[in-house]
């Protein structure tokens, strides 16, 4: 599939998902193909603002070296199924937040990666119990998506590595946000 048209099953799923999600092409520089309503609520950017562009626009001038190194390793490795990292992002109105970004590969029947799936969560303005709820919702979303995609021949890889310590993750993100605000 060279045109990477988004299968209907994925589109329907995108409309229904309660967590923020984005889908990009696996082709050069991963332009965004879809973002859902929850993504728009989180970032302030509509699909019209971002589709066709790389999602790094959310980073503005933040360096994010560690996070980007992790993402580069994930994108470059055929074997690595998913990545999860906090990354400093900015809403359309300029307010910073720490995005707990999850990314995984969607492969076609040939085994080639066709799409990149991602989900975003503002961990810096959250509480540990809300992060735990998000984590469970994202895990369920991935679980639900698997059989729907199987009909299209697309395989979503890996299961979600759930966050071992939500309290520490949230505390770390709040510290980072305080630095950004300060
Ligand atoms: C589907 C998808 C969604 C992404 N979502 C985000 C995001 O919400 N925030 C972000 O900072 N980066 C996001 N990224 C990562 C950036 O697009 C990019 O891959 C990353 O910044 C590393 O590349 P760079 O160093 O060339 O910018 C996403 C990538 C993909 C493929």
Image (cartoon, helix red, strand yellow):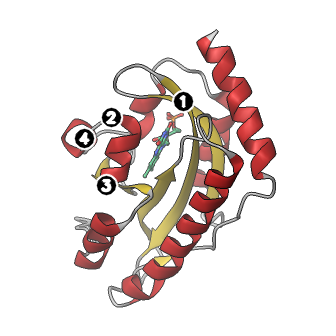
Question: Disc 1 or 3, which lies upstream in sequence?
Answer: 3
- Residue carrying label 3: 36
Q: How dense is the environment of label 1, judged by Cα within 10 Å: few (below 14), some, or many (20 and up)?
A: many
- Please tell me in which quadrant of the rendered image residue 25 appears: bottom left
- Total residue callouts: 4
Asked if the beta carbon under badge 3 is closer than 8 A to the nearest atom of ligand 1, the reply is no
Q: Distance from label 1 to label 4 (Cα)?
A: 18 Å
Mark 1–mark 3 CB contact (< 8 Å): no
Image quadrant for the N terminus?
bottom left
**Label 1: which secondary element:** strand
Q: How dense is the environment of label 3, judged by Cα within 10 Å: few (below 14), some, or many (20 and up)?
A: many
- Residue carrying label 4: 46
Q: Which mark is residue 123?
A: none
Q: Residue at x 65, y 63 (%)?
A: 80
**Label 2: which secondary element:** loop
- Residue carrying label 1: 97
- Residue carrying label 2: 44
Viewer-proximal residue among 108 and 161: 161
Question: Disc 2 or 1, which lies upstream in sequence?
Answer: 2
Q: Is residue 166 above or below residue 64?
A: below
Question: Residue 92: percent from the left, percent from the top?
Answer: 34, 26
Q: Distance from label 1 to label 3 (Cα)?
A: 19 Å
Q: Distance from label 4 to label 2 (Cα)?
A: 7 Å
Question: Disc 4 or 3, which lies upstream in sequence?
Answer: 3
Q: Residue at x 69, y 33 (%)?
A: 173
Question: Disc 1 or 4, which lies upstream in sequence?
Answer: 4
Q: Is residue 143 above or below residue 178?
A: below
**Label 4: which secondary element:** loop
**Label 3: which secondary element:** loop
Q: Distance from label 2 to label 1 (Cα)?
A: 12 Å
Q: Residue at x 60, y 64 (%)?
A: 78
């Amino acid at each position: 599939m060279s045109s990477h048209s988004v299968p209907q099953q994925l589109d329907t799923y995108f409309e229904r998902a309660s967590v923020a999600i984005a889908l990009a092409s696996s082709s050069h520089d991963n332009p965004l193909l879809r973002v859902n309503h929850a993504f728009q609520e989180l970032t302030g950017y509509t699909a019209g603002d971002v589709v066709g562009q790389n999602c790094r626009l959310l980073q503005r001038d933040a360096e994010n070296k560690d996070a980007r190194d992790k993402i580069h390793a994930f994108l470059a490795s055929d074997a690595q199924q998913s990545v999860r990292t906090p990354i400093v992002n900015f809403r359309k109105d300029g307010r910073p937040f720490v995005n707990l970004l999850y990314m995984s590969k969607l492969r076609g029947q040939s085994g080639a990666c066709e799409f990149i799936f991602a989900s975003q969560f503002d961990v810096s303005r959250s509480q540990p119990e809300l992060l735990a709820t998000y984590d469970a919702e994202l895990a369920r979303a991935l679980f639900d998506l698997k059989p729907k995609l199987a009909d299209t021949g697309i395989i979503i890889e890996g299961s979600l590595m759930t966050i071992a310590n939500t309290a520490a993750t949230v505390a770390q993100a709040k510290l980072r946000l305080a630095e950004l605000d300060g």
